Image: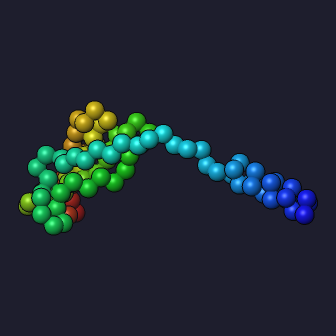
Amino acid sequence: MKRMSQLAAVISMGAVVALPAVASAQTFVEFDAPNAGTTDYLGTIPTNINSLDAITGYTVDAYGVTRGFVRTSSGDISWLNPYLALRSSRSRAR
């Protein structure tokens, strides 16, 4: 019986050691990029976040136009509008 108690103590200590470190509290911030659509299948779609809390993603506006963005941790939004992305695939083939 004593041996089982020791084994249980070792197993439970191992379980405590195996627990992951507790992360700090997280904050969620909701935001909508300017001119993003507001109905189904439109809007602001965040896709990634880095260690500096910069968020990348894209928006789809009411006309179906997709634009990429980067949002800094301070809330500033920069748009990603590569020249070729604004041209049709037919005009790029020439």
Q: Position of residue 50 (x, y in %)?
A: 41, 42
Q: Residue at x 12, y 57 (%)?
A: 37
Residue 5 showing in the rendered view: yes
Image quadrant in which the C terminus is located: bottom left
Along the viewing direction, whichever of 88 and 93 lies nearer the viewer: 88
In the image, residue 71 lies at what x, y percent?
A: 27, 41
Q: Tell how many labels.
A: 0
Report the side of 16 relative to 29 (left or right). right
Q: In this view, does 53 lie above or below 56?
A: above
Residue at 22% from the left image edge and 39% from the top image edge: 77
> What residue is rendered at 71% in x and 54% in y?
15
Vertical order, 79 against 59 (above or below): above
**What residue occupies the far left of the structure in this picture?**
63
**Left or right: 38, with 18 as reference point:** left
Res 9 quadrant in image: bottom right
Q: Indicate left or right for 81 with 11 as reference.
A: left
Residue 7 x %, y %: 85, 59
Q: State the residue at coordinates (19%, 48%).
A: 32
From the viewer's perspective, is residue 60 above or below residue 26?
Answer: below
Which quadrant of the view contains residue 4?
Answer: bottom right
Residue 64 visible in the picture:
no
Front-most of residues 68 and 83 = 68
Q: In this view, does 77 lie to the left or right of 18?
A: left
Q: How is the image coloured?
A: rainbow
